[in-house]
Amino acid sequence: MSVNQQAHTGPPYGQPQPGYQGYQQPAYRGQPLPGVPQSQYGAYNGPMPGYQQPAPPQGYFPSLGFPSKGSPVSLNSDTSSLPPNSIGSLRPPPASGAPPPASGASVPSGHVAYSQLGHGDVQNGIPTSTAPVQRPPASQPFLPGSAHTPVSQTSTFQQYGPPPASVQQLINHVAGMTVGSTTVSAPPPAGLGYGPPTSVPPVSGSFSATGSGLYTPYTASQGPPPSSVSEGLPLAQPPFPGQLISTQRLPTQVPGFAPPPSTGIGPSYPPTAGAPRPPTMTGPPLPGQTLAGPPTSQPNHVSSPPPPPSTMSGPHHGPPISGLHGPPPPTHPPQPGYQMQQNGSFGQVRGPQPNYGGAYPGVPNYGSQPGPPPPPKRLDPDSIPSPQLNELPPQQKPRHRIDPDAIPSPIQVIEDDRSNRGSEPFVTGVRGQVPPLVTTNFLVKDQGNASPRYIRCTSYNIPCTSDMAKQSQVPLAAVIKPLATLPPEENLPYLVDHGESGPVRCNRCKAYMCPFMQFIEGGRRFQCCFCSCVTEVPPHYFQHLDHTGKRVDFYDRPELSLGSYEFLATVDYCKNNKFPSPPAFIFMIDVSYNAVKSGLVRLICEELKSLLDYLPREGNMEESAIRVGFVTYNKVLHFYNVKSSLAQPQMMVVSDVADMFVPLLDGFLVNVNESRTVIASLLDQIPEMFADTRETETVFAPVIQAGLEALKAAECAGKLFIFHTSLPIAEAPGKLKNRDDRKLINTDKEKTLFQPQTSFYNNLAKDCVAQGCCVDLFLFPNQYLDVATLGVVTYQTGGSIYKYAYFQLETDQDRFLNDLRRDVQKEVGFDAVMRVRTSTGIRATDFFGAFYMSNTTDVEMAGLDCDKTITVEFKHDDKLSEDSGALLQCALLYTSCAGQRRLRIHNLSLNCCTQLADLYRNCETDTLINYLAKYAYRGVLSSPVKAVRDALISQCAQILACYRKNCASPSSAGQLILPECMKLLPVYLNCVLKSDVLQPGPDVTTDDRAYIRQLVTSMDVAETNVFFYPRLLPLTKADVDSDSLPAAIRNSEERLSKGDIYLLENGLNIFVWVGVNVQQGLLQNLFGVSSFGHISNTLSTLPVLENPFSKKVRSIVDMLQMQRSRYMKLIIVKQEDKLEMLFRHFLVEDKSLSGGASYVDFLCHMHKEIRQLLS
Ligand SMILES: [Zn+2]
């Protein structure tokens, strides 16, 4: 062992811990590793490998089923798993523990701070170091392999002797990628993913796909003018935290709400302690809302920053509810409709909202008119109270007692956030800041915490104790997208190369160096921010501290000053202690009768001829390092030798599928450029070879096994792209039978529809993960093919599933080809292991997503692409303190597409609170819904669907009741009071409850449900947001002269006008709905037909017509397509046509055909639940 190695700061990734070391150990294949503290988490049920494992055993709610938690404290979950000798023996303290003084050659010190940070922190000054030369251009510091850090590091570790062969080895392995200090021009690392632009949607479009920039065009320019500003401010302003909204007693009260006059809706906002100003309302006091209530000691009052002065006169909501209480004069509300607004909550001045109101008007520009509120419009002029909303016959137009305009509107919240937060960059320097919503387009500046594009939390202020957390029932979870795509304006994570010694880590918990580590003793040691252990600073990493205790090279080192960055991993982080080979892609094409007849085989082969030129490349590499291979199959498998020296490809048939092997090694995986002509010849021949096939049966498991064996033989990781059409009924391992049975719906056996029918695929998945074999599945079924079973391997290897039911060339090829192109080109890491470390007091206890877990802490993914998200839940295992807050560090070890082993680190600091109000004020409902949906979707594997739905409702009722009880001021039970940050919880929750997985309509197939279930499990927050509450745009209101989108409207049929055309998108589909009374000119412009009756509803694209309206609509559709990770299917829906039923399913504020409640009804129901909890 060389000196170098001994000097390592720490053993490789988690070496002393269960997780990672597995790579080198036999135990990796799924058996528990020795020393893994299974028992520690035993009771909790561990992180279930999302898929096959059922949800928590008993009790649906996490908080209930977590008994073991209370147990004593481990400083850090990792720690307890350390083998006794793991730490000390490895690192002899540097002699005398004294790091070299500053003069030491090893001090790489600062260089110029990288300007991108723009800190210009004078105090730190520019380090005295000698090496400014290495500084890359300011804007591009820390390029991979660029001169900067590496150089200085190099000199450092040379101290210990020249880099051993492994460095050279690494260089070889990365095929041209220079490691170390030589390559200066390499672009930032993570960008590698995409090839040159092609016909494929431009890469830049992918930005939005990450979810961050959705709704892009709709920004401030379109934002509501002044009046709305005054309305809007309060909403989005943290200062008015718990505001809320009260609706009057839903059950008994009056019919519609009259909109309040625009002035004076609420009390003006004097934060003064307790004396809320008398309301300036013009109306009589609302029932139940005595404004003069005593000041409360509500915490939210206290901590709310005062509103900007200008808001005082606006129609703001008044002080947080706290001041408003008082027994409602139930029987005699002078102005019933009014009350809701008083706190601003629901109403937040909803009444005056101009454009919103009309029933049918579909008014798009709500909020955009500064003028006085228009005359009140009600959805339902009929103000007679109706007895029981839910008893109304479905078809009858309901008589709302509650004006839908007076209940919290997702559109309004989105619009307000956009106008309040879309203009300023989100700077991550402050702990516990709640980021703008995912629907707001904003830039991020990393100043020490990970961007919300990488991590979003359900709350940015965590209760200090588990008791508080349990009381609130608010799940503490983070939604992590480790390889998220960033917009071009933002910097990719810098790649830091510490040379042979690898990243600096805490001795005990193995956390990686990060901005929260505290340097002490003049910089010779650092104290871990996660476990408090003190670790020696390795000599080569020593640096002096300035008078504030900060290292003078603070701004020179991404790992000291940024929330996200990457480390180049050393060989210690590699499987078998060998640097990895570049990955391979294997294309495996079903050539059975259906596939051939539909034209699919020919289509795939044609596409691959050009697509292979766009395999992911790293940085500035000229060609991709990825090798490719080809297999076709039906009941037997055909392998192809496409070695460059051959004149023609050779086929080898394996008909013994029971024991799969790869009949050739040399010539199966090849470089595209070298074998170009042979590959082209093969792709030309395949469709011909099978043109007359009569074979209808297929195998499936052997296909995966073949790919797996090929990767094993080549000793590399990779991805299988499998194009499959039918239930694999041919005699072979993994053979399936048709077990679809819709009669199981709503029975205790319904869960079996979501479970795989055999465990065969679970075992196969395990083998795939061990090899880094990720499986992407493209399905083209004409009938049931058991997605729940076929998807197991894909799911557990971090792959993606795409499904094109009843595939037809004409209508579906665009969608399929776009998906395929994106899937092949997108950034992906292989052989990935992710661990989330936390500071003392909380720990990650549960994980949701497409991955595999062989122990309780490490999330393993054979492949992880830029769209995949992992949701992590945290529980307390000790008390937290308000002073120190809570920290998360997500470390992802992966192999890049060029075969470089890297660690990507994301850090996030959160606040901690002792007051529940602080928790409720810093929640993010979109993230909460992401977690709840994934939790529920896993729950259906083990519990009856109804139980899952009831549990969801119950949990949310508890969350809201806890707020009401502890944070809102006393008030009549008849009032529904929602926390400002969660006022959309009921509407969004209802959407989850009505979704196809939890409440399927008659047209939803078993495969559809299994498919959706898997998709949602890997979605990020932006995707779940639009999936559950689709975006509905009035196309006819679009301004053809601007780039902006028309303002969205709420998802209800009542918002649609017969004279307009609308677009609805949910991330999977785009519907274009055409009203029966649309002007002929518009129809001509958009569809090129003269009348409504001539519109074809089989169109899958809009005709290309040369007029402004057509161009505008097509540009909107194109833009939306680029924002999503999948190409959405376009469906034209004519009003009153049969397809309209399908469309209505997505009007989620309405009652659904499958029995889902309308928003208004559900809100009443939630209110009832909350009241029961409070009484
Ligand atoms: Zn530590």
Image (cartoon, helix red, strand yellow):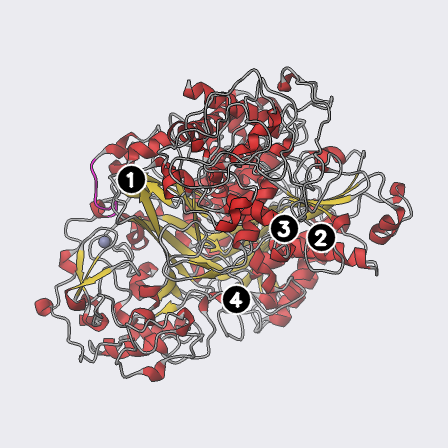
Q: Which-is-in-front pick, marks 2 and 4?
A: 4
Mark 4 crowdedness (10 Å alpha carbons): few <14, some 14-19, many ≥20? few
Element type at mark 1:
loop
What's drawn in magenta, residue-wise?
72-78
Q: CA distance from mark 2 to mark 1?
A: 53 Å
Quickly name the residue at label 4: 489
Is residue 1132 found inside the magenta-colored segment of the image? no
Residue 254 percent coordinates (x, y): 62, 21
Q: Which-is-in-front pick, marks 3 and 4?
A: 3
Residue 775 percent coordinates (x, y): 51, 50
Q: In terms of sequence position, does the residue under pointer 3 or pointer 4 come before the other?
A: 3
Quickly name the residue at label 3: 224
Residue 402 percent coordinates (x, y): 62, 26
Q: Which-is-in-front pick, marks 3 and 1?
A: 3
Kindly identify the amino acid type of the residue bearing the numbered disc 4: Glu
Q: Which mark is residue 464?
A: 1
